[in-house]
Image (cartoon, rainbow, N blue to C red):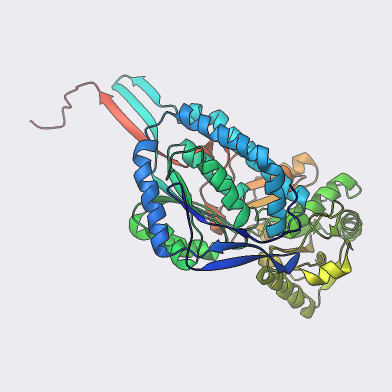
Amino acid sequence: MTVKHLTKPYVVHALINGKAVAADKQFSRENPTNPDEIVCYAPVNSREDAIAAIDAAYQSFAAWKLTEVGERVKRMRKAIEKLKASVGELAQLLSLEHGKPLYDAEGEFAVSFMWMEFACDHAEEVLREEVRQHDKGKTIITKDPIGVVSAITPWNYPISLSTIKIAPALLAGNTMVLKPSPYAPLTVSKVVELIAAEFPPGVLNIVHGEADVGVELTSNRKVAKIAFTGGTETAKHIMKAASDTIKKMTLELGGNDAAIVLRGFDVGDERAMRRMVISNFLTAGQICMIAKRIYVHRSLYDEFVQKYIEAANKWIRVGDPFDPHATIGPVNNKKQAEHVQRLIDDAKNRGSEVIPLGTVLDAGLFEQGYFMQPTVVLGCGYDDPIVVEEQFGPTVPILPFDDEEQVIALHNESIYGLTSSVWGREEDAIRVARRIEAGTTMINTAAVQGLDVQFPFGGVKQSGVGREYGIEGILSYTETHVINLPHHLELPYIPE
């Protein structure tokens, strides 16, 4: 089925306790390639709807937590097979509502499947109880589910950043209420419906809406854990809302990830330079873990800039997400495009040089949608907004540095610490990487190209709390419960 050209918009509903729930009000999601076209209408759910979804999850938790892990895995695998059978249409829907090229949407689903299957493969082992015999008796350690999880997900990678929460939460025996971003509500809703159909009613629910829904999901006493991916400022409000009931949290937040190019980097390595360009501009630069600033050793700077521009001009082709020649589509929404443009304009006003990159495939379409031609910014100051703020769009500054001490300090003075990358000879790169303050540091690659779902992912400082992916990502949805069976010893220091 081809969904590029709609005959009419899709209609999205909330899913509460296994039933579709409409709302009195709706919001529309436009096609970022053609903002005059409405892709879908989604409900503006009320606070009462959020409470109903939480209550449904709370009630279903009592039985779901008692199911065998093997039964949970069986159900999740069936859901994965259903998603795979529908991935052609789902990827097209994602391109349509998000703006990312079709290959990028398909790649997002591929990462989602890798993670969901990893979680299924390891759930029984990770969640198995441990029995320790020791000289004081016996101790049983169990990994119990936490309860109702509120998941709040962003628009940039809406499928992978939803399934990264759904799979481990449900496999661990929790129930969930998920709220997607209004900038990408359609495909997530389809995915949740397909998964939820394989589980008892109330185990997985989805609601849409405005701030009052988010407040309820983060403050309701029946919610035991919050799993949020999004901006750091929003996370601060979530932490405050959750503080009265001391909820568990996994927060994957913003980043201003740096790529550090050492003296020993081979500027003539075309494949490495292409990886660098992709690490800056995949998904139009709208990835939390993308490299958003590049520091290059001064001895390489001029040649690096030249080779970088050559590589960018070869790879970057801005166009219709359904055009197989396009590597970059539009920015997801007008607000984000305006934010990126403000940073670019500020850089120009400060005297920086802004160089357009790549090819625009269709000038008429470019003017119609939320398209931005990618740019590289040269001559910035180290403290300029385009360097210290998260652009989350198709622009990147390149700055020189003189020695390792300087560049490590430039990296670590940021309030963020999600991912980073070091480019150069392996021994040198590892030495520098050990001193970087970040959740992940990649060597000679960056962003999604270096992601491995087997290992934990998350940030330090204001880039987040906790970890997703890996066995740690499964355990983050559990409580450790210790059951002690000591020998009956009389302790001499306790009086009778």
Question: How many dots with numbers?
Answer: 0
Point 81% across, 59% down: residue:
320
* Residue furthest to the left: 496
Q: Residue at x 83, y 68 (%)?
A: 366
Q: Nearer the viewer, residue 159 or 228?
A: 159
Of residue 270 and residue 278, the one placed in the foreground of this image is: 278
Q: Position of residue 467 (x, y in %)?
A: 54, 45
Residue 69 as seen in the image, left or right of residue 357: left
Where is residue 480 drawn, in percent x and y?
39, 36
Q: Residue at x 42, y 45 (%)?
A: 202
Q: Nearer the viewer, residue 446 or 299?
A: 446
**Residue 458 visible in rendering:** no
Residue with the most extreme bottom position: 349
In the displayed structure, 336 sits above or below 244; it is below
x and y percentages locating residue 168 in the rendered image: 51, 39
Query: Can residue 469 be seen at all in this image of the molecule?
Result: yes
Left or right of 74 on screen, residue 435: right
Picture coordinates of residue 378 (x, y %)?
Answer: 82, 68
